Image (tube, rainbow, N blue to C red):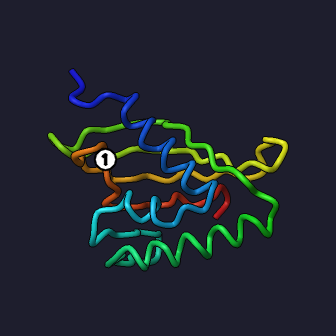
Amino acid sequence: MESYDSDDVQAFLTTFGVAVSTGDLDAIAEAYAFPALTVRQGSSEIVPDPDTVRDAARDAARGHRERGLVAAAPYLDDVEEVGDALLWARVRWSYRDENANEKESRTVRYLLRRARDGFEVCVVVPEAPDGA
């Protein structure tokens, strides 16, 4: 039996997606536990504090706007329990233009820890795009 509610995970991701879509840097930073970690194929980076998240989110938002992307919609692909309070969530992000057409997508795995009001991001693992 699952000790988490997938609707709760989806609600957390949806709220996170709204923050990304609207550029709410504080809400994005509040979704993280600190220190957090980003792990890519060739490197790992500690995310020490909210300012680091805000800076990265600001840069990402600028790039999205330059490519005409105005919304980020999360689709929960898979959840794996790691323990009583930890979950691996595989999320497909759909980045959309002003007409709600998907223009880009990306899959990211998150290690989420239960928090008082939902979840918090502990580890971010972006999956390599196809062909990379």
Q: Is residue 60 left or right of residue 125?
A: right
Frontmost residue, 120 versus 76? 120
From this view, report whether residue 95 is shown above or below residue 45. above
Using a 10 Å C-alpha cutoff, classify the residue at mark 1 as few (fewer than 14 neighbours), some (14 to 19) or many (20 or more): many
Number of numbered discs on residues: 1
Instruction: Tell me the residue that label 1 is attached to.
Output: 119
Name which residue lies at 50% across and 53% down.
108
Q: Position of residue 8 (x, y in %)?
A: 36, 33
Q: Is residue 25 left or right of residue 46?
A: right
Q: Position of residue 27 (x, y in %)?
A: 45, 59
Dividing the picture into quadrants, the one containing residue 74 is top right
Name which residue lies at 22% across and 46% down.
116
Which residue lies most toward the left here?
84
From this view, report whether residue 46 is shown above or below residue 32. below
Dividing the picture into quadrants, the one containing residue 131 is bottom right
Q: Is residue 131 left or right of residue 13?
A: right
Q: Is residue 80 left or right of residue 68?
A: left
Name which residue lies at 55% across and 69% down.
57
Q: Position of residue 75 (x, y in %)?
A: 55, 38
From this view, report whether residue 88 is shown above or below residue 77. below
Dividing the picture into quadrants, the one containing residue 9 is top left
Frontmost residue, 21 versus 93? 21
Quarter occupied by the N terminus: top left
Q: Secondary structure at mark 1?
A: strand
